[in-house]
Image (tube, helix red, strand yellow):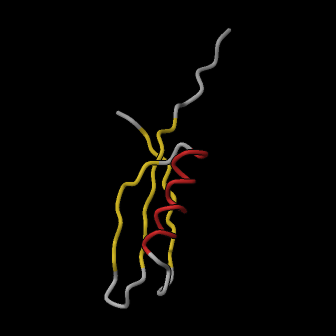
Amino acid sequence: MAEYAYLVIYLPRGTSRDTARKILARHAEYGDWELSRLRLNADSSRKATLRRRVIPAVRTF
């Protein structure tokens, strides 16, 4: 079963949709993160949960 590392990004109210897209795209492109969940709150703030797969190191002899 795959293991994942998670990163939560809070985008405050007033952050435009285009700016949010650029921030998430940078994390995806340069940090190998993928969008797991995006939540739009009632006050128009966003909470994005990103994940990336963790590959455990196997010791070789």
Describe residue 43's horizontal placement relative to residue 27 as left or right.
left
The image quarter in which residue 58 lies:
top right
The percent coordinates of residue 59 (x first, y second) are: 63, 18
Nearest the camera: 53 or 42? 42
The percent coordinates of residue 48 (x first, y second) are: 43, 66
Who's the residue at 43% across and 40% down the image?
3
Question: Please, is residue 60 above or below residue 37 in the view?
Answer: above
The N terminus, quarter of image: top left
The percent coordinates of residue 6 (x first, y second) are: 48, 55
Q: Tell me how many marks there are.
A: 0
**Outermost residue, right side:** 61
Who's the residue at 51% across and 48% down the image?
28
The C terminus, quarter of image: top right
The image quarter in which residue 60 lies:
top right
Nearest the camera: 7 or 18? 18
**Outermost residue, top side:** 61
**Outermost residue, bottom side:** 43
Question: Please, is residue 61 above or below residue 31 in the view?
Answer: above
The image quarter in which residue 17 lies:
bottom left
Who's the residue at 34% across and 83% down the image?
41
